Image (spheres, grey):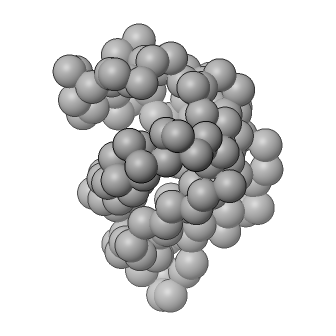
Amino acid sequence: MTEFTSEVQTIHYSAERVFERLSDLNQLDQLKASLPADKVSNFSCDRDSCQFNVSPVGQISVRVIEREPFKTIKLTSEKSPISFTAWVQLKALAPDDTRLKLTIQADIPFMLKGMVQKPLQEGIQKAAEFLAGISY
């Protein structure tokens, strides 16, 4: 397994509010208009799962497998060219000061590692910045 971690991001909302929004994947459906249409399409979600198509990767489907209130949301791939597990980690420093970090552990075949390592690291960083920038 190869691990990718974002830089820690600051969110000026409570950890409870951030957790409530991110732990219900239905809430992400409201954000699909903000996603780059040339990269992400066919985006749909329910409370526990989300499916979308990423160019040029293909169809990806994820499911929430664990929620630790106000701290962690753990997701796993159900359909993806590369099997992975992802964590959204939250830490409350003050009532309206929450830190967010994304971590992905991916099972990348050795032959693909050189080609996908940099795009995956950049992608997780952009995802963390995106999540830090939305209104909760």
- Residue 121 position, x and y percent, is 39, 56
Instruction: From the top left corner, tell me how far across and down residue 84 is, in percent.
Output: 65, 43
**In the figure, 12 relative to 122: above or below?**
below
How many numbered marks appear? 0
Identified at 48% across, 87% down, the residue is 94
Residue 37, quarter of the rendered image: top left
Which quarter of the rendering shows the C terminus?
Answer: bottom left
Q: Residue furthest front?
A: 111
Viewer-nearest residue: 14 or 59: 59
Residue 48 drawn at (x, y percent): 70, 31
Residue 95 position (above or below residue 133)? below
Task: Using residue 23 as the reference point, say whether residue 96 is left or right of it.
Answer: left
The residue furthest top is: 42
In this rendered view, identify the residue nearer to me: 117 or 58.
117
Q: Using the rendered image of the protein, determine whether residue 13 is visible from the camera's viewpoint.
A: no
Q: Nearer the viewer, residue 100 or 70?
A: 100
For this orientation, the residue located farthest to the bottom is 93
Examine the rendering and report whether any part of residue 46 can be seen: yes
Determine the residue positioned at 22% across, 29% down. Answer: 36
109 sits to left or right of 21: right
Say which residue appears at 42% left-offset and 24% top-offset: 57
User: The N terminus lies in which quarter of the figure?
Assistant: bottom right
Residue 135 as seen in the image, left or right of residue 61: left
- Quadrant in which residue 64 is drawn: top right
Name the foreground residue: 92 vs 74: 74
* Residue in the image at 66% along x and 68% along y: 71
In the image, residue 128 sits, relative to residue 99, either above or below, namely above
Which x, y percent locates residue 59?
Answer: 50, 17
